[in-house]
Amino acid sequence: MQLAIAPTGFPLKPPPLRAPDAARRDAEIALKFETLIAETLLRSARAAQLGDDGLGASGGQVRDMIDHSRAEAIARAAPLGVARLLAAERARTMPEPRRMETQK
């Protein structure tokens, strides 16, 4: 009795190639995401804060700008680690482009 073995599942394919500047672009996007998280934390902290911040009732836009500036500074100087984790995961799932060997 002979058993026929048929391939099942998906055929193996090489991972798609990445553009040369993809790592830099990924790092910028990850930093923007980390800035967004820090900004959300700052806004939540401000909402929980009791008392007057000195900007009055009409300082909403100024407060938002201050929160955004602080969030950018936090993301660059003392990152939470989200950008690093995103970049590492992206690098793991999308490897750097392969170089084509030139034939002599």
Image (cartoon, rainbow, N blue to C red):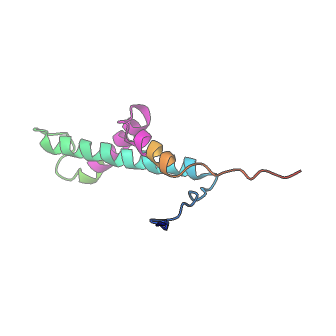
Q: Which residue of the protein is positioned furthest toward the left in this rendering?
A: 50
State yes or no: residue 81 in magenta: yes
Q: Which residue of the protein is positioned furthest toward the right in this rendering?
A: 104
Residue 103: x, y in percent? 85, 52
| Image quadrant where residue 66 sits | top left
Q: Nearer the viewer, residue 62 or 12?
A: 12
Q: Report whether 4 appears left or right of 73.
A: right
Q: Report whether 103 appears left or right of 87.
A: right
| Residue 48 seen from this side | yes
Query: Residue at image x 47%, y 44%?
Result: 87
Q: Nearer the viewer, residue 42 or 3?
A: 3
Q: Which residues are magenta?
A: 63-86
Residue 71: x, y in percent? 35, 41
Q: Is residue 29 above or below residue 41?
A: below
Query: Residue at image x 44%, y 65%?
Result: 9
| Residue 28 seen from this side | no
Q: Which residue of the protein is positioned furthest toward the front in this rendering?
A: 1
Type of secondary structure dominating the magenta stretch = helix
| Image quadrant where residue 31 sits | top left
Label count reads 0
Query: Residue at image x 61%, y 57%?
Result: 17
Query: Residue at image x 52%, y 64%?
Result: 11
State yes or no: residue 21 in magenta: no
Residue 42: x, y in percent? 25, 42
Q: Nearer the viewer, residue 13 or 41?
A: 13
Q: Is residue 53 above or below residue 26?
A: above
Q: Report whether 92 appears left or right of 80.
A: right
